[in-house]
Amino acid sequence: MNALAKFRPAILSLNQITRSYALKSDLKIKWVRPEKIPCYKPEKSGDLQAMPKFAGTELMKDFRESKELETANEHVRNLFSIEHNRRREMVEIFKEDMVRRVYRHELDYGSMEAKLGLMTARIRSLQEYMEQFPRQSVVKVQLKELIDKRKRFLRYLRRWDYRRFEYILEKLDLVYKPYPTKFHWITRKDSLRKLTDTHCEQIKQSRLEEYRQQLEAQQLDFLEKKLNNLELIRKEQIECQVPVTVEADQIKAVRKQFEELKRKREAIAESKREQEDS
């Protein structure tokens, strides 16, 4: 017992040592880490629309103009429809539709517009596939590479032909999202610092607004007192035959300001009274 009593003051002194710089703030600020959005999602890639839903009764691309299928049995037509074939056939129809939105002529598949249409169709089909199978790492890599390639094409087009760039964005329902000029990690410390600055700015603005309302409430009395003081000073200077420092125009301007403010306050009070009565 005596041995423990010797070390008791040292234990108390250790317990009193605290980290003053790590104290929690009394401000009601809560930070929640933002949800991480993968780069292949439409929110990051800039695609405003997803791949459309086909009815399934459309014929495949190579059999649309077949005269035999026009008079064929329903079961035979179903064999050549999108619904009873591979998904690739539906993607081919979607690619053709996207190219037809921006192509220059009927056989255009090599221009910048046609390439962007093909890439956009491929990207949206892979995005739909990734929604169903999110663990397909190979498809994810292909999708990332396609999105990066389309960004490079759009950046080049934006630099050299801005009108065509805007035309393609409108026709393909895209939003150009360039790479950030400066990368920074999202950390709790920096975010709390920004939130604290925002909170302090809101407090500052609210107090300034309260002080402004308080001054506006006292403005009418202040102008009345100022007008009386100016008239009194001018009257006494004239009676004492000393140089007059208060001009008549100055008193007239203050009186005009006082009357305008008084009329404005009366109109506001009357409108509030009418609203309460109604």
Image (tube, grey):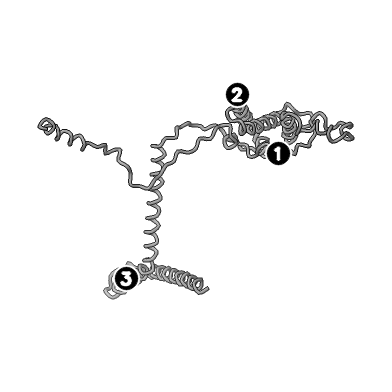
**46 up-or-down from 202: above or below:** above
In the image, is 121 to the left or to the right of 221? right
**Within 10 angstroms of label 3, few (less than 14), some, or many (20 or more) residues?**
few
The residue furthest left is: 2
The residue furthest bottom is: 239
**214 up-or-down from 30: above or below:** below
Q: Which mark is residue 222?
A: none
**114 up-or-down from 212: above or below:** above
Residue at (61, 28) in percent of width and height: 143
Q: Are marks 3 and 2 in contact (CB under 8 Å)?
A: no
Residue at mark 3 to residue at mark 2: CA–CA distance: 86 Å
Q: Which mark is residue 138?
A: 2
Residue at mark 2 to residue at mark 1: CA–CA distance: 25 Å
Residue underneath mark 3: 229
User: In the depicted view, which residue is nearer to us: 122 or 248?
Assistant: 122
Q: Nearer the viewer, mark 3 or mark 2?
A: 2
Place of residue 129 in the rendered image (x, y in percent of width and height, measured from the top left): 64, 31
Q: Amino acid at mark 3?
A: Asn
